[in-house]
Image (spheres, grey):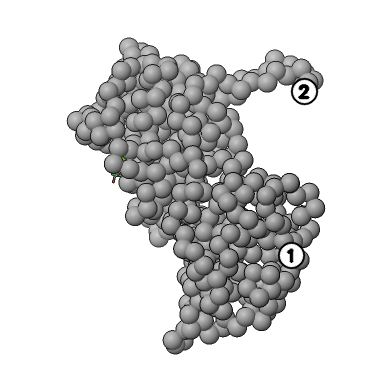
Amino acid sequence: MTARESSVYRCQQCGFASPKGGTCPDCKRETGTFIELVEERTAPARGTRRAVASSERPRPLKDVALDRGDRAPTTIGELDRVLGGGVVRGSLVLIGGEPGAGKSTLLLQAARALARSSPPVLYVSAEESAAQVKMRANRLGIDGDGLLLWAENDLSAIQAELDQVQPRALVIDSIQTVFLPELESAPGSVAQVRECGARLMTLAKGRGIATFLVGHVTKEGALAGPRVLEHLVDTVLYFEGEHHHAYRVLRAVKNRFGSTNEIGVFEMGERGLAEVTNPSGFFLAERPHDAPGSVVVASLEGTRPLLLELQALVARASFGTPRRTVLGADYNRVCLLLAVLEKRAGVPLASQDVFVNVAGGGRVTEPAADLGIVIAAASSYMDRPVPSDILVLGEVGLTGEVRAVTGLEPRLRAAAALGFRRAVVPASGATDRPKLALEIVPVETVERALGVLLG
Ligand code: TYD
Ligand code: MG
């Protein structure tokens, strides 16, 4: 061990580094997840050093040229938007998701599209045989001009082949199944994943190859193993979706070349992933009319408003502690909102089971959906429907006040475009409302909203 190196224990599950072993305080997994590694103390992992080109001397900000990167559009609009407008040459993109989410499908489709605009593209399958990938390609109707396929998991062999092929884009499916033979640990271990990631970073940057890495996520939601790569790569995308629902959402959680707010929506069908350019229509397609407990909200994902149907079912608890079951929203947030509904609007929920669901397997992540959740629960409790042409928006505070939401205008526009006629919105933000064929009903409190919608 040289002076610059020291030994650390690294959690095999999440990559947490510690001077000693034991239980990982980060992912709270049982003991025995730590392995001892020899690591350089201060130097960053190989390959990260030239991630940002050093500018020669300090200079005024106004003189710095804007560099949007050398981008190649994949022509899959939903993917390009999440990447920040196409894939950047020499960038390293990690795509995480549960097994079966559709990562291989998405990347095969992206590889085909890139092979048309910037060939050649090399798709390395370290998980499935070439014949298996070919079968998927047939299903997707991919012919493969300019697209090279290779079933290989030895990264040093892959590296050698890159000299011959000189691809413009590279897919490694997956980072957990490729390995460097000089390391003793098994493929998928933290040491392998980290070293392979660093090696691929050097290759991507050095040769200007846009590189996509597939990373499997465990059931608990952590990018096990690949999490150690999150700081290294340029972009981290998650591909999410319920198995029994056709829709899939691609979300950026880190992006050095674009916003992390954008999402891409796809539908998994018989012939692969189709872009869903009007996700609101998709989510509202099966909405029941005039059913108690159903409310439509508009969430804003990046620049794009998404209309979603919230459903609540409030039923008398048969025994013991009443149940709270939440799908597609934050559990604690829903509990808080139910407490506000009880205390500030006098809806007695203490003896009621409450189930909250976002229809179609969707997800709400922002407080603008608060009022919708409160109204849906109240609507179900009272067994009175909210008129189906009304959109409900607003953050709810603990005193029962309805607070302003950001991006009111795009949300209202999206609702108007889908035929909504009225919108219940926070009074405080309703002054700068756009001129739309939509009647605006400003409310200041939850109580007032209940009066307007269910009174
Ligand atoms: P896959 O891309 O293999 O997922 P991952 O690489 O994330 O593990 O595909 C996931 C599922 O999608 C698989 O169970 C089969 C299904 N599927 C379709 O429904 N239609 C299709 O055209 C394809 C290729 C897959
Ligand atoms: Mg796969």
Q: Is residue 271 toward the left or the right of residue 332 in the image? A: left
| Dot placed on the residue nearer the N-terminal end, 1 or 2 | 2
Residue 225's image quarter? top left
Q: Residue at x 52, y 62 (%)?
A: 310
In front of the other: 445 or 255: 445
Q: Residue at x 73, y 69 (%)?
A: 445
Check disc 1 and report its element: helix, strand or loop. strand
Q: Amino acid at mark 2?
A: Leu
Q: Residue at x 70, y 77 (%)?
A: 344
Q: Residue furthest left?
A: 131
Which image quadrant: the C terminus? Answer: bottom right
Residue identifier under label 2: 61
| Residue 451 position within the rendered picture, expressed as x and y whole percent measured from the top left | 69, 73
**Local crowd size for mark 2, using a 10 Å CA cut-off: few (<14), some (14–19), many (≥20):** few
In front of the other: 441 or 162: 441
Label 1 with label 2: CB-CB less than 8 Å? no
Q: Is residue 238 toward the left or the right of residue 302 in the image? A: left
In the rendered image of this protein, does residue 356 appear above or below residue 277?
A: below
Q: Amino acid at mark 1?
A: Val
Q: Residue at x 37, y 20 (%)?
A: 115
Distance Cα–Cα, label 1 vs label 2: 45 Å
Asked if residue 328 can be seen in this view, the reply is: yes
In front of the other: 89 or 370: 370
* Tag shown at residue 115: none
In the rendered image of this protein, does residue 450 appear above or below residue 261?
A: below
* Tag shown at residue 443: 1
